[in-house]
Image: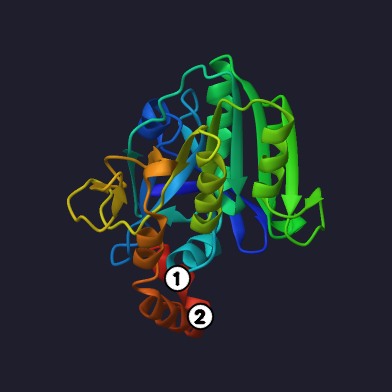
Amino acid sequence: MFEIKEKKELGKDLCQFRVHAPYIARRRRPGQFIMLRIYEKGERFPLTVSDADPESGDIWFIAMGIGKSTKLLNSLKEGDKIRDIVGPLGKPTPVKKHGTVACVGGGVGIALIYPLVKAYREAGNRLISILGARTKELLILEEEIRSNCDELIVTTDDGSYGRKGFVTDALRDLMEREKVDFVIAVGPVPMMKAVADLTRDRGIETMVSLNPIMVDGTGMCGACRVQVGGKTLFGCVDGPEFNAHEVDFDILMKRLSAYKPMEEESLRLFLAQGEGNTRVAGGE
C-alpha cells in the first residue's frame, strides 16, 4: 500500500500527488512511468513520474480526471492509500547533447516534459519549451519548467493566457526564427501527429512519448502495441518514446478509441454511485 503524503489541486479535475515510493524514487529516470491500481479489483493504468527525490524516497505524478480510474484517484485525500504502484517502467529517455532542443508539451503531457527539460538542460542543450493548454486553468508546471529552460512560450486555445493558438503555431514560428536541432513532443495524439508532420519536412529529428492502452505495463499482454516504422512494437517495453516520423498515428488513434463505449458506461456507473467510491478505493 502506498500512502498519499500530499495532494495538490492544480485545476479542475487535475491533481498532483506525492507518494512515498523509495525504490521507484531511486531508480526512476526521465521518460519512465508507473502503473497504478487503486484497489484490489480496480484496473491498472499508467501515469508519468513527473518528479522524484531519491533522498526522501518520494515521487510525484499528475492525473487528469477523464475516466473512472483517474476520477477515482483524484477523489482520494491525503492519508488515503493506493493499493499498487509498480515501476519504474519503460525505457529511460536517451538524453544527449543535440544543440537547440524544443520541448513541446500539451495538456497533462506537460507532466512528462518537465523531467525531460531538466535532463536535456543538464546535458548542455539550449532549451526552448512550448507549453499548450485549452485554457489558462489547465496549464500546469509553468514556473517549474520556466526555471529550467532558456525560453518558455505558452499558448492557450482560447487565448486566456499567453499566445492564442496551438503549440504547432508557436513551433513553426520558432523554426523559422532559428535553427532547431531536436524536438520532443508529448500530449494528445493529434497534437503529436501535427508536430511530426511539421518537423518531417524540415528533417528535424523528433521524438514523441506514446500512451497507448496498457494492461500490465511489462509487455505480457500486448494491448499497447503500436506501429512504428512498419513494425509492431509495444509501448510499455519498447517505448514509451519513439521516432515521431515513424509512428502510425492513425492506427494509434483507432486503438485508443476501441473501448470508448465501455469506458463511457463505466464512468457513468461510477458517477452514479457517488460518495461511496472513495471508501471502496481506500480499502474500507
Residue lying at 68% horizontally and 26% vertically, measured from the top left: 149
Helix, strand or loop at label 2? It is helix
Residue lying at 53% horizontally and 40% vertically, measured from the top left: 201
Q: Which residue is mark 2?
A: 271
Of the residues shown, which amino acid type is indicated by label 1?
Lys
Q: Quarter holding the C terminus?
A: bottom left
In front of the other: 243 or 111: 243
Evaluate whether residue 158 shows in this view: yes
Q: Which residue is mark 1?
A: 68
- Residue 104 falls in which quadrant of the image? top right
In front of the other: 200 or 40: 200
Residue lying at 37% horizontally and 44% vertically, measured from the top left: 246
Q: Earlier in the sequence, mark 2 or mark 1?
A: 1
Label of residue 184 in the image: none
- Residue 222 falls in which quadrant of the image? bottom left
Drawn side of residue 191 relative to residue 89, left or right: right
Q: Are marks 2 and 1 in contact (CB under 8 Å)?
A: no
Drawn side of residue 119 relative to residue 155, left or right: left
Evaluate whether residue 143 shows in this view: no
202 relative to 215, above or below: above
Q: Residues within 10 Å of mark 1 (few under 14, many from 20)?
A: many
Drawn side of residue 221 relative to residue 88, left or right: left
